[in-house]
Image (tube, rainbow, N blue to C red):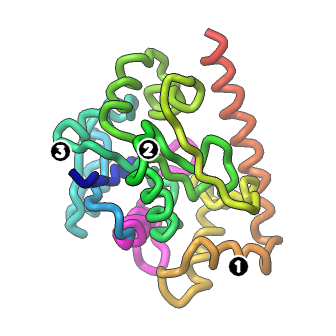
Amino acid sequence: MKKKITAIVQARIGSSRLRGKVLKKINSKETIILLLERLSRAKKINDIIVAIPNTKENDVLFEVLKKHNYKIFRGSEKNVLKRYYDCAKNYKISNILRITGDCPLVDPLLVDKVASIYLSNNYDYVSNIEDRTFPDGMDMEFFNFKTLSKILANVISKYDKEHVTKYVLRTNIFDKYNFKQSKNFSDLRITLDTKDDFLLIKKIFENFRNSLFSYNDIIKYYQKNKKIFIKTKEASLKQERENLSQGQKIWSK
């Protein structure tokens, strides 16, 4: 039977660095809608569900998604891993693409490339983040429900519950594949986490006539406009140090 992939996009209003970032508008559209419109062009993704917290403050996000006719699942705010599991179980999803609301520049062409590897093999987990060559903000992770269930059964820390797949990345009990590109742009930051990130992403969207531009188009834009990416590069390095510090605390337990 042919594998079918459902993208589960995690999003929320609450964010310590940039509150309400998924509803900030670029060209009159919320960044979460820009993300979903781009992702919906991936030919190898059969369905998209947005998994949001079941808290009152996220009702406004629910209404925006409902207005645009996207499927929505509501679950735990802090235990994002459980939110993913409950969503997948509720919709009987066998194969999952994990995308976060931080990635409005997700490229459907790249999604299809990585999806093809997942679909034509029997890996437990396929991503482009384990040995990173892509920018922060172009992240994608493919895994099956069995892998998700195994993660849920093994993790106990708040860190793992919040970050969903960190357990997979630091253990060797899963059959994994990492998608890499020949040129390394891992120090480039095009994720949405701070005000500077938002201003950069806004410039990128406004630079192109429509929202159909690709990852390669973004790289070309970067190579011609490196100065406007400096602040976000510095933020990326700082975030990487924070993530490493958090991870080391978990791994040492």
Quarter holding the C terminus is top right
Whole-Å distance between the Cαs marked 3 and 2? 25 Å
Q: Is residue 23 left or right of residue 251?
A: left
Q: Residue at x 55, y 51 (%)?
A: 18
Whole-Å distance between the Cαs marked 1 and 2? 31 Å
The residue singled out by tag 3 in the image is 91
Q: Is residue 151 left or right of residue 74?
A: right
Where disc 3 sits, the SS reads loop
Q: Is residue 239 left or right of residue 125?
A: right
Q: Is residue 197 visible?
A: yes
Q: Amino acid at mark 3?
A: Tyr
- Is disc 3 surrounded by few (<14), some (14 to 19) or many (20+) residues within 10 Å? few
Where disc 2 sits, the SS reads loop
Q: Is residue 89 above or below residue 2?
A: above
- Is disc 1 surrounded by few (<14), some (14 to 19) or many (20+) residues within 10 Å? some
Which of label 3 and label 2 is nearer to you? 3
Sequence order check: which comes first, mark 3 or mark 1? 3
Where disc 1 sits, the SS reads helix
Q: Residue furthest bottom?
A: 209
The residue singled out by tag 1 in the image is 221
The disc at residue 14 is 2
Q: Which one is in front, 38 or 6?
A: 6
Q: Residue at x 40, y 42 (%)?
A: 122
Sequence order check: which comes first, mark 1 or mark 2? 2
Q: Which residues are magenta?
A: 14-41
Residue 212 point in image, percent of width and height: 48, 81
Q: Amino acid at mark 2?
A: Gly
34 within the magenta span:
yes
Residue 182 point in image, percent of width and height: 73, 61
